[in-house]
């Protein structure tokens, strides 16, 4: 499995970008997972940025939880710059 740090832009001119960590077999599957995740509605796909990260299982477990070490999916979704929003998992914690 591969780890991707993604940044997506809103479909409309206004609104903040969003960021997430996606764990998938490849880039195509990562985009498919985002298309099926309702949190990405209103955002342009494929993402504006998709960076492959290198992380150990221990780093993934520490940053995203045990489930992320063995299940594909979208983790740590966050809207950037939204007041009161908690930041997404720092990409540096996953080697991005």
Image: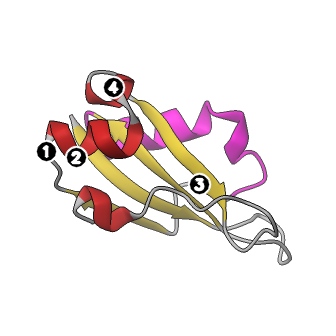
Q: Nearer the N terminus, badge 4 or badge 1?
A: 1
Disc 3 and disc 4 in contact, CB within 8 angstroms: no
Q: Left or right: where does residue 56 sit relative to residue 94?
A: left
The kind of secondary structure element at disc 2 is helix
Q: Nearer the viewer, residue 35 or 59?
A: 59
User: Residue drawn 33% across and 26% down?
Assistant: 66
Residue bounds of the magenta highlight = 25-43
Mark 3 secondary-structure assignment: loop
Report which residue position mark 2 lands on: 59
What is the distance, in whole Å, between disc 1 and disc 3 at their CAs?
Answer: 28 Å
Residue beneath disc 1: 56
Q: Secondary structure at mark 1?
A: loop
11 on left or right of 62: right
Inter-mark Cα distance, 2 to 3: 27 Å
**Secondary structure beneath disc 4?**
helix
Q: Which residue is mark 3?
A: 45
Mark 1 and mark 2 in contact? Answer it, CB < 8 Å: yes
Cβ–Cβ under 8 Å for marks 4 and 1: no
Which residue is under mark 4?
66
Residues tagged 1 and 3 counted as in contact (Cβ below 8 A): no
For this view, does 24 lie left or right of residue 8?
left
Calculate the distance from the C-alpha at mark 3 to the C-alpha at mark 4.
28 Å
Query: Label 4, label 1: how many angstroms apart (C-alpha)?
Result: 12 Å
On whether residue 4 falls in the magenta region, the answer is no
Residue drawn at 46 percent across, 56 percent down: 89
- Residue 72 image position (x, y, % from top left): 37, 27
| Residue 14 drawn above or below residue 41 | below
Disc 2 vs disc 3: which is toward the camera? 2
The residue furthest front is: 62
* Label ID, residue 93: none
Assess disc 3: are there few (<14), some (14-19) or many (≥20) residues with their C-alpha within 10 Å of its C-alpha.
some
Q: Is residue 21 left or right of residue 48?
A: left
């Amino acid at each position: 499995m591969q780890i991707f740090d993604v940044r997506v832009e809103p479909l409309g001119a206004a609104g903040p970008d969003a960021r997430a960590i996606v764990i998938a077999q490849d880039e195509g599957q990562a985009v498919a997972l985002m298309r099926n995740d309702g949190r990405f509605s209103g955002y342009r796909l494929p993402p504006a940025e998709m960076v492959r990260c290198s992380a150990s299982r221990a780093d993934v477990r520490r940053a995203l939880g045990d489930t992320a070490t063995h299940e594909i999916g979208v983790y740590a979704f966050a809207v950037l710059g939204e007041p009161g929003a908690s930041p997404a998992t720092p990409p540096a914690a996953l080697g991005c």
